[in-house]
Structures are given as C-alpha cells and as structure tokens.
Amino acid sequence: MNHPELVEKLCLKLYGLLGKEDNDYLEQLIEQDVEVRSIWEALLDNHENAPLEENNLQASLQGIKQLLEQRKKRRGIIRKGVLTCLLVMLVGSVTWWLALPRPSLNSESILSLPESKAVTIRLAGGAPIALPADSNWQFPSGQWLLQVRRDTLQLFSSMPEKAEGWHVLQVPDGHRYTLVLGDASTITLDPQSQLKFPASFHEKTNREVYLEGSGTFTIAPEKRSTFIVHTDQANVTVLGTRFEVSSRNALFRTKLIRGKVRLSVGNETVVLTAGQTALLPKGGSRFVLDKPHAPAAAKAMAGVQLENFRLDEIAERMRHHYHIQVVVDEASQGRNFDGSVVFAKEVTLEQFLKNMEQDDSSFHYQWHSDTLYIK
C-alpha cells in the first residue's frame, strides 16, 4: 500500500466507511508501525480542529497530506539541528584533546639533561640521568640498574665482565652524595664536585678515579690492586684507608683520617700517616705537611700510637694491653706494619684488629682456641 492510498484508507476509517477486514488491518498497522501511528494521530488532530464533511473527502485528504508534509519538514529540520550540534561537540572535543600537553615518548625525554640543581650521573656512552635527593629510587638503563638509598648511589651491572668506559657523577651546589663502587669502596662528594670512575674494576691492575672538587674516600683493601685518585694538581695512592681530598680554588689538600697514603706530584713523593694533612698550592712542586698538635692528638688517641713498627713488636704490645696470647707467623716476624695503630682503653680488641686490616691490606689474623695468630 503506497502513502497516498494509506492516507485515504485512514481517512475512511476515521468516518467509519471501511469494512471490518480493512479496519482490523489498519488497527494492527497503527499499533505496530510508528509512521502509520503518526499519520493517524495527525488525522485525529485535524478532525478535531475542522471536522470533515463526507462530501468533501478529497479536499480533506489534500489538507491532511499538506499537514503531514509540514510535520515531515519540521522533523527533518530538528534532525539536522541535532546532528549539527553533535558534530560541533565532537570537533570541539577532538580539538581540546589534541591541545592537551603530553610528554614525549622517546628515550631522550627520560634521560634528558635535568636542571643544574639536580645530582646527575652520565653512564658510559649515555645521556645524563637526574638522581633524586633524600629518597629511595631504582632505575634500569641498559645493562645497569641504578639504586639510590638516601643520597647513596650504587650501580649494578648484568654483565660486569663486559662493562667498559667511564661514568661521571656530578654533584651541584647544595648537595652531598655518596657513591658505592664495585669494590665496596665509598666516596662522598662535596657540593660542586665531580667524579669520573670506570664502569668496572674487573681485571684492572689499578683502581683509578678522577676528582674535580672535593670528597671523602673510604677505600676497601685489595691485595692485587692499588687505589689512585687523580686530580688536576696531584695524585693520591692508597691501600685500605680513609682520607679526604680537595682540589679547588688553586689549592690541593688531603687529610689522612686512617691508614696510609702516598702523594705524588712530578718527582715529589710524600707518605702521610693518620692525622696528617698535606697542602699543595697550584703550580707548586713540593707538599707542605701539617701534623696535628701534640695535645690534640693525645686527646684524640687517649693512648699510645705506633707507626712503622714490626709485627712482632705490635704483638708484644697486644699481649700486655689486651691480656691475650698472640703468635706471629714466622715469615712475618720482621715485617713492618704498613700503617699506624693506637692502643687506647676505648679501642676494643675487635675494633683494633679491624683497623689493622683496613690500614694494611697484607695484614691477616685468625683465632685458634684462645690464641690469636697474625701475619
């Protein structure tokens, strides 16, 4: 049934001029078809406003068709308006989303050069990485895992035997940062300082680092390898010790806290013992040594300090001071202890032996029952 025929049939239904079969069919259409229902409701509205005469059915049909066309046009206009609004909202949303700032996804954004106030490390062949201050943090970078615990940095490599090149740690003004090296030595850098150190000490004859600025070094003993700190003015060679080094403002300065170090500049070589400080002006060729004052040294030690004594002489002193049996290995009877020892009431035997190990990498001890064996 086409549209004009449908309107005509509905109009006949309105005036009860349809047979039962056609009337039931249209009732079913009105109930199931939205468009037919809309036409029927329009016929009812039009009939209430202007009742139709049976003899003027064609004119009435024409008026109903015009009314339906008007409603159809209005619905088309409404649809277009709704679609236009939806399109404007969609375009606005996309424009807003595109305008949002977002971080770059390339690797350089992660490892880009941070602000000058941040502590940074430049891994061998890599870009600078900013390190956090006063917090715990982990960051993987290639074969390396960087681990920070309260301003202390430690590097772990998945392939230490293949690690090559040099790392550079930079500490700006307002910070102090500690680095734990692969040999367990620790270096605390002062503000405005930089340390260049190898990616690995694996199979190296010497453990060498390069310092600009100042820092405190605690070096782990290593029989087969000496530790050397290079500065632009002088070099410091150490064996199991703790010391401070500063090279800034045209003045080189090192202070030995424990153990023994050897300083060198040109052909000049000086050995420092605990408590001594050495100065070297820029361009100078000789070190100026400054020993602690006797009263201050005595107060600090509160006991007896021995330097460059043979092991058998130190063992004899240990027997009387700690009331123990001490036996010196026969091959070490005449060997000089490479460092200084302090006998004082506040220094326990355990601490005394630990200090001897740190000061002289060749020193070893072992207990058998109540007897201490040293060499």
Image (tube, grey):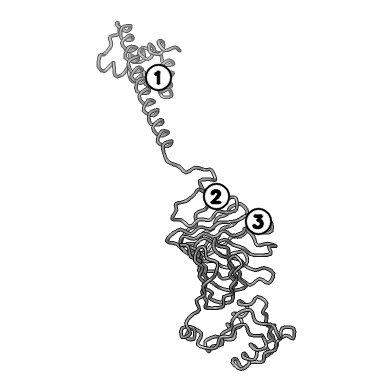
Q: Is residue 305 above or below residue 289?
A: below
Q: Nearer the viewer, mark 2 or mark 1?
A: 2
Q: CA distance from mark 2 to mark 1?
A: 74 Å
The quadrant in which the N terminus is found is: top left
At x 65%, y 62%, the residue is 201
Q: Identify the element where label 3 is drawn.
A: loop
At x 43%, y 15%, the residue is 22
At x 54%, y 45%, the residue is 107
User: Would you say 342 lies left or right of 10 here?
Assistant: right
Specify the amino acid type for callout 2. Answer: Ala
| Residue topped by disc 2 | 127
| Residue topped by disc 1 | 36
Graded by Cα atoms within 10 Å as few (under 14), some (14 to 19) or many (20 or more), the crowding at tag 2 reads some
The quadrant in which the C terminus is found is: bottom right
Closer to the chain start, of discs 3 and 1, is: 1
Q: Identify the element where label 2 is drawn.
A: loop
Nearer-the-camera pick, 307 or 26: 307
User: Would you say 178 lies left or right of 60 here?
Assistant: right
Q: Nearer the viewer, mark 3 or mark 1?
A: 3
Rendered image quadrant of residue 371: bottom right
Horizontal and vertical percent for residue 17? 36, 12
Horizontal and vertical percent for residue 71? 33, 18
Closer to the chain start, of discs 2 and 1, is: 1
Specify the amino acid type for callout 1. Answer: Val
Nearer-the-camera pick, 368 or 32: 368
Horizontal and vertical percent for residue 119? 48, 57
User: Would you say 292 lies left or right of 70 here?
Assistant: right
| Residue topped by disc 3 | 163
| Name of the residue lying farthest toward the left | 49
Rendered image quadrant of residue 340: bottom right
Q: CA distance from mark 3 to mark 1?
A: 83 Å
